[in-house]
Image (spheres, grey):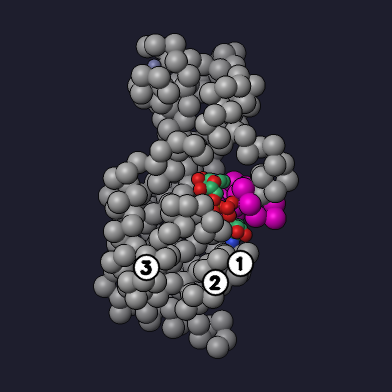
């Protein structure tokens, strides 16, 4: 089948579906200028040492890791990057009444910035709009913590208890929020179409979503430059840039 015919076929499946669920990973934000982890230009591909920033045990044990993490947060501060055509296409899909749930592994808030409704969005790995104290659990706006970093504090601590502060993201080694996972898995097991976009589909437990969808008889569509473990089970795989393919599909829905 030609690519255009494939795009038409997927758009038709979405039109006739009663429940469409989308899963996004770091790949949908690379066109906004935020590097992914495992792609060819990924942060971890280029510098495996950078993985430490995402592991809770290193973060807690090593002040240097925290200092580097605060610098990285300053670079990725909310509002610095703009959503791209991929994010906007998902807003259009929602406006067409064809997006039931959007599950994202991303922490960059770009789906919200683009205009996706918070009610349909599940940020399974958290977000960077807030910081949380690892000791007392208190939350505060990221902006306030970054202002302290800006003013010279290398590793700002919790104002209430002196504990370690971290962005409100789920690092490796931390528990995911059970309610979010339940919602995500329920969505996957009850949909007719699952679009998996910009994810290697290797990070569990979210990587189980395609499994659940397939078991429920749903169609799996993958948009990702590199192969994923699910490419052979998918009814369509697009390896072109997300910002090109996704708007093409959505405009035909
Ligand atoms: P990943 O880094 O493991 O993989 C991203 C995939 O997207 C790669 O296979 C890459 O080939 C593909 N890709 C990149 N740009 C693309 C494009 N324009 N078009 C098509 N394909 C493209 O991402 P992941 O599986 O989501 O896992 C990384 C984890 O790290 C996530 O769970 C997330 O929490 C976190 N993370 C988040 C961000 C963010 O919020 N923007 C960025 C980096 C990492
Ligand atoms: Zn505290």
Residue corresponding to mark 1: 227
Q: Earlier in the sequence, mark 2 or mark 3?
A: 3
Residue corresponding to mark 3: 213
Seen from the viewer's position, the closer of residues 19 and 84 is 19
Q: Are marks 2 and 1 in contact (CB under 8 Å)?
A: yes
- Name which quarter of the figure residue 252 lies in: bottom left
Residue 152, given in percent of the width and then of the height, sits at 59, 13
Q: Secondary structure at mark 1?
A: loop
Residue depicted at x 61% and y 21%: 62
As displayed, is residue 111 above or below residue 151? below
* Residue 119 visible in the snapshot: yes
Q: Secondary structure at mark 2?
A: helix
Query: Residue lying farthest bottom?
Result: 1
* Residue 93 visible in the snapshot: no
As displayed, is residue 91 above or below residue 236? above
Residue 77, given in percent of the width and then of the height, sits at 53, 33
- Name which quarter of the figure residue 14 lies in: bottom left
Q: Relative to 26, is 160 on the left or the right?
A: left
Q: Earlier in the sequence, mark 1 or mark 3?
A: 3
Q: Are marks 1 and 3 in contact (CB under 8 Å)?
A: no
- Name which quarter of the figure residue 127 lies in: top left
Residues drawn in magenta:
26-41
Real-space Cα separation, disc 2 to disc 1, in angstroms: 6 Å
Placement of the N terminus among the 4 image quadrants: bottom right
Residue corresponding to mark 2: 231
Which mark identifies residue 174? Answer: none
Real-space Cα separation, disc 2 to disc 3, in angstroms: 14 Å
Residue depicted at x 39% and y 41%: 176
Q: Quadrant of ligand 2?
A: top left
Q: Secondary structure at mark 3?
A: helix
């Amino acid at each position: 089948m030609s690519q255009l015919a494939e795009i038409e076929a997927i758009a038709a499946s979405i039109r006739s579906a009663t429940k469409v669920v989308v899963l996004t990973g770091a790949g949908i934000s690379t066109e906004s200028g935020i590097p992914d982890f495992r792609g060819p230009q990924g942060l971890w591909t280029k510098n495996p040492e950078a993985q430490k920033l995402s592991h809770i045990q290193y973060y807690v044990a090593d002040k240097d890791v925290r200092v580097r993490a605060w610098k990285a947060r300053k670079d990725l501060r909310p509002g610095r990057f703009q959503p791209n055509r991929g994010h906007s296409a998902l807003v259009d899909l929602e406006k067409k009444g064809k997006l039931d749930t959007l599950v994202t592994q991303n922490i960059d808030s770009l789906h919200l910035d683009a205009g996706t409704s918070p009610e349909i969005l599940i940020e399974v790995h958290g977000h960077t709009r807030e910081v949380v104290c690892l000791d007392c659990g208190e939350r505060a706006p990221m902006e306030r913590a970054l202002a302290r970093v800006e003013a010279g504090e290398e590793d700002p601590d919790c104002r209430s208890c002196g504990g370690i502060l971290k962005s409100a993201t789920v690092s490796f080694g931390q528990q995911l929020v059970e309610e979010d996972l339940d919602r995500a898995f329920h969505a996957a097991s009850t949909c007719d179409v699952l679009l998996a976009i910009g994810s290697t589909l290797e990070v569990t437990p979210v990587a189980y979503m395609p499994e659940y969808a397939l078991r429920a008889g749903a169609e799996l569509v993958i948009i990702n430059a590199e192969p994923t473990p699910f490419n052979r089970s998918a009814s369509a795989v697009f390896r072109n840039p997300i910002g090109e393919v996704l708007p093409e599909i959505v405009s035909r829905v």
